[in-house]
Image: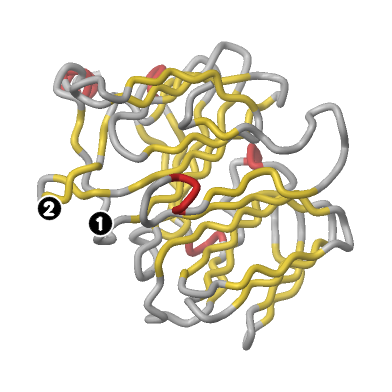
Amino acid sequence: MSHLLRKNRLNKSSQQAGQTQLVTPKSANWRYVGFEAHQLKAGESITVETATDEVCAVILSGKANASTKLDAWQNIGDRMSVFDQKAPYSVYSPAQDEIRIEAITDVEVAFCKAPGKGGFAAKLITPEQCQYETRGVASNTRHVCNILFGNEPADSLLVCEVITPSGGWSSYPPHKHDTDAAPAETQLEETYYHKIDPPQGFVFQRVYTDDRRIDETMAVEDGDLVMVPEGYHPVGVPHGYQSYYLNVMAGPSRNWIFHNDPDHAWIIERDKKA
């Protein structure tokens, strides 16, 4: 199994709740991005201390109460599935704070982490504050929701989610963001937290560099996570299934400037004429 693939920690045959993913900069052998995902049964709760990170807690599905040290929000969450094509509710917290999630219904929540300077106050990010758009044409169509991107300020975190229809491709044509060379490209580590509809399906993700020093193609199942330390990272979805993934990015600067694989950049120009 690829060292870039982290399998869902929970047994797929069980109905148990708990932590499905945990990635730290140390475990990933990089500097910036941390990620954890949890499934909570109604009535359960979890508190995450932010320490030196800023954290964005994304309510992937279900309804919950949420709080930080100074603020609280009741009954947030407006979708029962990540495939509802509704933007999520999220809670942002700066360093030296905490986020507590109390499940009203069964809840899946993701905690997206990156180094924080404490420059921004805790806040609720509502669906109305997210940026939702459809990109691409034909089999390259995908639905993107920016949760903590250009729509909202932060110290280093970038968070978005993408739905790719059956038989489609996303993060495609392949692009990378692993070189600190603004304004041409920025260096950003990235995680992909995958969900599949129906959940017994799978998608493919390839991560590769120009020199093929990294060249991994992975079969990714529901609840799995792919780490992208560098290189290009397209996703392909088999017929009959939908793909969802939550992206977390962070690096030396909070700018998403990517570079397309020159071998496949021609596709962009062709699609402009479609």
Q: Position of residue 222 (x, y in %)?
A: 65, 30
Residue type highlighted by circle 1 = Asn
Q: Horizontal placement of 247 versus 203: left or right?
A: left
Instruction: Quarter of the image for the C terminus: give it.
Output: top left
The residue at the far bottom in this view is 70
In the picture, the disc for residue 255 is 1
Secondary-structure class at tag 2: loop
Q: Is residue 69 above or below residue 259?
A: below
Answer with the quarter of the image where residue 58 lies.
bottom right
Asked whether 193 or 106 is in front, the reply is 193
Q: Position of residue 151 (x, y in %)?
A: 38, 62
Residue at 45% from the left image edge and 50% from the top image edge: 248
In the picture, the disc for residue 158 is none
> How is the protein colored in the picture?
secondary structure
Residue type highlighted by circle 2 = Ala
Question: Could you tell me how far apart the alpha carbons at marks 1 and 2 are, in whole angstroms?
Answer: 9 Å
Residue at 40% from the left image edge and 67% from the top image edge: 115
What residue is pinned by disc 2?
182
Q: Horizontal placement of 37 versus 227: left or right?
A: right
Graded by Cα atoms within 10 Å as few (under 14), some (14 to 19) or many (20 or more), the crowding at tag 1 reads many
Residue at 33% from the left image edge and 60% from the top image edge: 150
| Marks 1 & 2, CB-CB < 8 Å contact | yes
